[in-house]
């Protein structure tokens, strides 16, 4: 491993993310650093804490929590890059809801234009009603990203990444990246990542590789391996994978940037933990009937249509259960995917139902005994990955069948071919993890199309 790679990994390790508070109020702080340009760094901080960890106060007849957050970030000379303090008044969930759900609050802040080096982070949350508090005082290493040199940002681990056209605090570009400050991932969910690549202009034949490995096993699982577009000065990459088939334990997510000779030029790593409750917990099915009923109401007839988004292991378990067990399984399944448990709605379930409804309406086959839209290849991909960022529709030519190309962020794409000529578009080729191209895709696609799309 060369000096640049070693330096970057040491900087990531020195930050020791995530960080945990001491005191009566427990909270967790995570961080990720990105380039600000000019040799300066943009440092983001993400934190979470239990929503019900405060004494209630009465405001206009409503039970609320009132707490103060104080954050300072100082360089080795004591100069402050962050010096923030604010008071939050937020509705306090009902005691029954707190008991039934593991509700947490999420927030984040960023410091732009930091000089690389050693910093000290001080963080405190104080309950203004009870006086109880939690504190954190830790060293943080801010890494360097030199202009023009190939490099990889630190990795932000997230519980969900999706398109976002609003102005939310978790928005990056056109994406909402929901942080997971504890880097703890459990049953029924997935792990998502966000990273940035810099200094790619002069990198001919460059390749990006994303993989993970267990602390107990040196064998890596490859998530993504792709050639980088020539002349692209910088790039954003997002992705995700399910952890249902991964044993509980510690892991590392690795990102490596190499040249055309497979020499590693830059790398970044992020530790995470997989920890889930034993699935035997479904023996207590029925104890959460109210929550099950509410989720089923939100999902409607698509509540149990999980075949396109659950792993093979999860589906096998689900099919072995009796009716009560399946109801509890689905409750846990959707609860684990809820991006904001503090809200009454399960946004992931509602979005899933919307995608299924759209797929059935848009992609259903009109001929007798034709497949419903959600059964088709396009329907499955739409339900699993959502709205394409771009659709390239190429009608039939004298030497080729009709072609649809769906493009998504992160260079992920799907190519569908209407082989029969009657509107049944079949998936011919994709570079998406967890999806397979047709074995005979080279015969289905024209040579010109394969050359234009860089398909080998």
Image (cartoon, helix red, strand yellow):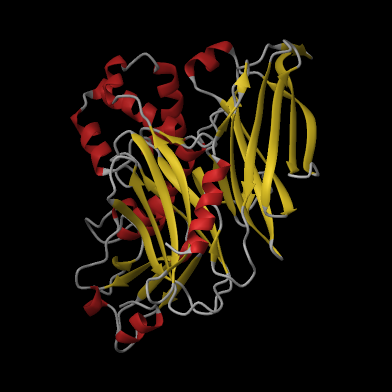
Residue situated in front as seen by the camera: 277 or 259: 259
Quadrant of the snapshot with the N terminus: bottom left
- Of all residues, the one furthest to the bottom in this rendering is 398
State left or right for residue 357 relative to residue 110. Answer: left
State left or right for residue 237 relative to residue 423. Answer: right
- Relative to 337, say whether 398 is above or below: below
**Identity of the residue drawn at 53% across and 57% down:** 7
**Identity of the residue drawn at 48% across and 16% down:** 100
Note whether residue 193 is visible: yes
- Relative to 138, say whether 444 is above or below: below
Residue 127: x, y in percent? 72, 17
Quadrant of the snapshot with the C terminus: bottom left
**Identity of the residue drawn at 56% across and 44% down:** 14
**Identity of the residue drawn at 31% across and 55% down:** 434
State left or right for residue 48 relative to residue 310. Answer: right
Residue 153: x, y in percent? 56, 57
Residue situated in front as seen by the camera: 231 or 81: 81
Residue situated in front as seen by the camera: 273 or 145: 145
Note whether residue 162 is visible: no
Identify the image quadrant of residue 70.
Answer: top right
- Relative to 369, say whether 75 is above or below: above
Residue 189: x, y in percent? 40, 38
Residue 336: x, y in percent? 43, 32
How many numbered circles does the render carry? 0
Identify the image quadrant of residue 69.
Answer: top right
């Amino acid at each position: 491993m060369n000096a640049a790679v070693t330096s970057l990994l040491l900087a990531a390790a020195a930050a020791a993310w995530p960080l945990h508070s001491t005191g009566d109020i427990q909270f967790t702080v995570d961080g990720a650093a990105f380039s600000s340009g000019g040799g300066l760094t943009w440092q983001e901080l993400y934190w979470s804490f239990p929503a019900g960890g405060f004494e209630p106060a009465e405001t206009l007849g409503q039970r609320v929590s009132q707490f103060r957050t104080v954050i300072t970030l100082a360089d080795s000379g004591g100069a402050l890059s962050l010096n923030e303090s604010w008071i939050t008044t937020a509705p306090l969930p009902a005691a029954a809801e707190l008991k039934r759900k593991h509700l947490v609050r999420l927030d984040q802040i960023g410091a732009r234009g930091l000089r690389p080096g050693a910093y000290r982070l001080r963080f405190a949350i104080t309950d203004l009603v009870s006086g109880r508090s939690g504190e954190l005082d830790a060293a943080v290493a801010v890494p360097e990203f030199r202009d023009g040199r190939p490099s990889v940002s630190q990795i932000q681990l997230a519980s969900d990444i999706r398109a976002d056209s609003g102005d939310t605090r978790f928005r990056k570009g056109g994406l909402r990246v929901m942080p997971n400050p504890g880097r703890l991932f459990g049953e029924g969910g997935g792990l998502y990542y966000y990273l940035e690549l810099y200094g790619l202009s002069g990198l001919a034949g460059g390749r990006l590789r994303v993989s993970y490995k267990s602390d107990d096993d040196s064998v890596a699982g490859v998530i993504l391996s792709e050639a980088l577009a020539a002349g692209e000065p910088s790039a954003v990459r997002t992705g995700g994978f399910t952890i249902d088939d991964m044993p509980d334990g510690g892991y590392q997510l690795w990102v490596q940037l190499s040249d055309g000779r497979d020499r590693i030029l830059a790398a970044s790593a992020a530790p995470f933990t997989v920890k889930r409750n034993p699935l035997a917990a479904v023996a207590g099915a029925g104890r959460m009937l109210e929550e099950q009923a509410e989720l089923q109401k939100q999902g409607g007839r698509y509540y149990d249509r999980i075949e396109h988004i659950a792993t093979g292991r999860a589906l096998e378990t689900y099919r072995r259960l009796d009716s009560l067990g399946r109801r509890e399984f689905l409750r846990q399944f959707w609860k684990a995917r809820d991006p904001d448990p503090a809200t009454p709605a399960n946004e992931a379930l509602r979005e899933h139902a919307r995608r299924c409804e759209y797929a059935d309406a848009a992609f259903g086959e009109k001929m007798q005994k034709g497949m419903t839209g959600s059964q088709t290849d396009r329907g499955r991909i739409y339900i699993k990955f959502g709205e394409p960022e771009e659709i390239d529709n190429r009608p039939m030519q004298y030497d080729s069948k009709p072609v649809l190309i769906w493009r998504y962020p992160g260079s992920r794409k799907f190519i569908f071919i209407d082989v029969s000529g009657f509107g049944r578009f079949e998936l011919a080729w994709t570079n998406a993890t967890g999806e397979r191209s047709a074995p005979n895709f080279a015969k289905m696609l024209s040579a010109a199309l394969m050359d234009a799309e860089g398909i080998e």
